[in-house]
């Protein structure tokens, strides 16, 4: 399995339970991390033992990768582009400014090197609208298509065609419940996250199909430990305001939209990303 995500923490806050589940079952799970997370907010005292924020967030990702038992991380090294409309979008080293063909080739290289059966990444909305997530989704979809073509990017390694492509998806039903509950706990659903730049109300409108629902109850503690590695980004505290039994119920399943092969009207929701393989 190859997971392709934009920032240090996306792998844990997102499909961390799924990555842990398959790694525990003996699947070789690799991660592509596209950016350095340099546009994130970090408390000054957290930098005491690190030269800069990039070094801190790299250390946090290494911690999470070990907890999740990943085989390794391919670092693309772009600068975090920040949220849409921020000055970070204009930084020349940002993922947002990188040539799309270059990003596609880098993902093709990872696919050909690790030769996964299954590739996962964010959906077309970038999960919560982050421009890095959106661009990486577009690049991953194209890389998935061309990685098996020997005429495409011949310098990126021997061709390999993965068999499944999935996108992370929110369970909108429970998200609606969370949006209703948050004001009761003094939380604004339009200003979610450490930087208060995630609009959960908007995310509800970006509803996508749920084609796979993965039971991660046995691996939820591992997901939370991996998330806690990203302490600079509030790891392990994202839903601390929510009653424990509700939090565990919400986080016990991770959901995905199937990108390839295309679903049909008769397709049934699956509980295994490797179904039929």
Image (cartoon, rainbow, N blue to C red):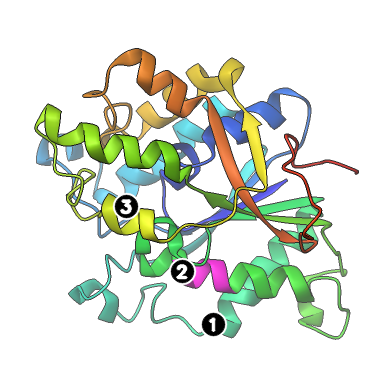
Q: Badge 2 local density, few (<14 within 10 Å), some, or many (20+)?
A: many
- Residue 100 sits above or below residue 60 on the image: below
Prevalent SS, magenta region = helix
Q: Indicate the position of residue 17 as horizontal and vertical percent values.
A: 56, 30
Total numbered labels placed on residues in the image: 3
Closer to the camera in the image, 248 or 178: 178
Mark 3 lies on residue: 54
- Residue 219 sits above or below residue 105 on the image: above
User: Does residue 96 appear left or right of residue 5 in this picture?
Assistant: left
Span highlighted in magenta in the image: 134-138
**Disc 2 and disc 1 in contact, CB within 8 angstroms:** no
Q: Indicate the position of residue 203 as horizontal and vertical percent values.
A: 35, 56
Q: In which image quadrant can residue 266 be found?
A: bottom right
> Which dot marks residue 100?
1
Quarter of the N terminus within the rendering: top right
- Residue 23 sits above or below residue 233 on the image: above
Quarter of the C terminus within the rendering: top right
Q: Indicate the position of residue 113 as horizontal and vertical percent values.
A: 77, 58
Residue shown at 13%/29% (left/top)? Answer: 184
Mark 2 lies on residue: 134
- Which is closer to the viewer, label 2 or label 3? 2
Does residue 249 appear in the picture of this structure?
yes
- Which is closer to the viewer, label 3 or label 1? 1
Element class at badge 1: helix
Q: CA distance from mark 3 to mark 1?
A: 23 Å
**Disc 3 and disc 1 in contact, CB within 8 angstroms:** no
Residue shown at 26%/23% (left/top)? Answer: 242
């Amino acid at each position: 399995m190859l997971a392709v995500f934009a920032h240090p923490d996306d792998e844990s806050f997102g499909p961390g339970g799924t990555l842990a589940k398959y790694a525990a079952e003996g699947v070789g799970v690799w991660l592509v991390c596209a950016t350095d997370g340099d546009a994130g907010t970090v408390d000054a005292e957290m930098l005491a033992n690190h030269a800069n924020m990039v070094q801190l967030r790299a250390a946090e990702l290494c911690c999470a990768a070990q907890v999740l038992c990943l085989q390794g991380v391919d670092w693309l090294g772009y600068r975090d582009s920040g949220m849409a409309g921020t000055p970070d979008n204009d930084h020349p080293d940002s993922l947002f400014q990188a040539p799309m063909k270059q990003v596609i080739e880098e993902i093709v290289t990872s696919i050909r090197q690790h030769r996964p059966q299954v590739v996962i990444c964010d959906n077309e909305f970038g999960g919560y609208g982050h421009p890095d997530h959106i661009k990486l989704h577009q690049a991953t979809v194209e890389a998935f298509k061309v990685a098996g073509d020997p005429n495409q990017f011949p310098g990126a390694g021997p061709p390999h065609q993965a068999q499944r492509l999935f996108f992370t998806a929110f369970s909108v039903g429970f998200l609606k419940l969370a949006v209703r509950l948050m004001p009761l706990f003094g939380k604004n659903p339009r200003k979610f996250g450490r930087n208060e730049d995630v609009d959960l109300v908007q995310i509800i409108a970006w509803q996508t199909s749920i084609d796979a629902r993965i039971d991660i109850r046995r691996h939820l503690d591992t997901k939370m430990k991996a998330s806690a590695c990203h302490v600079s980004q509030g790891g392990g505290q994202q839903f601390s305001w929510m009653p424990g039994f509700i939090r565990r119920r919400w986080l016990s399943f991770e959901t995905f939209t199937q990108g390839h092969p295309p679903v049909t009207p008769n397709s049934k929701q699956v509980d295994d990303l490797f179904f039929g393989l």
